[in-house]
Amino acid sequence: MADSSDKKIAIDTIKSEMRKCFSEVGSFSDLELDAAVNLIGIKKFQKGELLLSEGDNAAQSYAVVTGCIRQYYLVDGEEKTTFFYTEGQSIFAPNSTSNRIPAKYYLSCVEDTTLTVITLTNQLEMYRRFPMLESLSRNSLQEELHNYQEMLANYITTNPEERYLNLLKHRPELLHRVPQYQLASYLGVTAESLSRIRKRIFIK
């Protein structure tokens, strides 16, 4: 009973945040807000669980409520980590969801994770009923694209130690939440090289 009660409290909190977000882009009645929120599901996933695999057609988008999701590619049998999604970040798969192009990467839970989930069908229905939300979604997608461009530019123009220092500055929580071999892959180095970088920085 306690678990059921806790889950209800969590869902009510998440829906309250959704209502707040929706209200920022337009004037909605309580009935309209409930209708929009009810098109969005809330799911829990276990550590290590895959949300998406290479070759899959993504049929839904996510936003992280709690937890951490890793995006990675499999290149010649080796995992190449490209991003970590944490609380408050959205996970879109625009090519896969809208154009039915198979995904080229994987999405895996680094921790036990709670996500909001919306299917492509429900997303289109929400946009049909609430056009202002499509603008909100488009802005979020553009912001994500900008972040990817910044991340790529940073990766190209910095060395591994500078990348690690940038991680320390902007996303220090990842150091305590993500296994070292995954962080090393994200920074483009081996786990041994990452260990040496940490030692050098600690000595300084």
Image (spheres, rainbow, N blue to C red):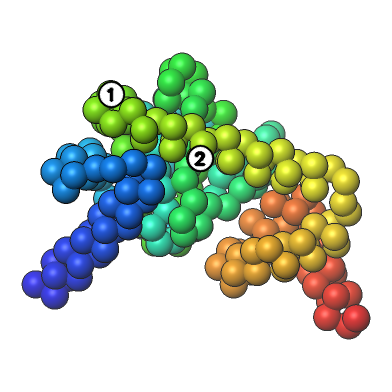
Please give the residue where the numbered disc 2 appears in the rendered image: 140
The answer to the question of whether label 2 and label 1 lie on touching residues, with beta carbons closer than 8 A, is no
Mark 1 Cα within 10 Å, few/some/many (few <14, many 20+)? few
- Residue at the location (62% across, 36% down)? 145
Q: Is residue 19 above or below residue 170?
A: above
Residue placed most toward the observer, 46 or 121: 121
Q: Inspect this view and state whether residue 135 appears.
A: yes
Please give the residue where the numbered disc 1 appears in the rendered image: 128
Residue 113, horizontal then vertical, whole percent: 39, 58
Residue 137's image quarter? top left
Which secondary structure, mark 1? helix
Q: Quadrant of the C terminus?
A: bottom right
Q: Is residue 150 left or right of residue 68?
A: right
Q: Check disc 2 and give the amino acid type.
A: Ser
Q: How many marks?
A: 2
- Residue at the location (36% across, 33% down)? 132
Of pointers 2 and 1, the one earlier in the residue sequence:
1
Q: Inspect this view and state whether residue 93 appears.
A: no
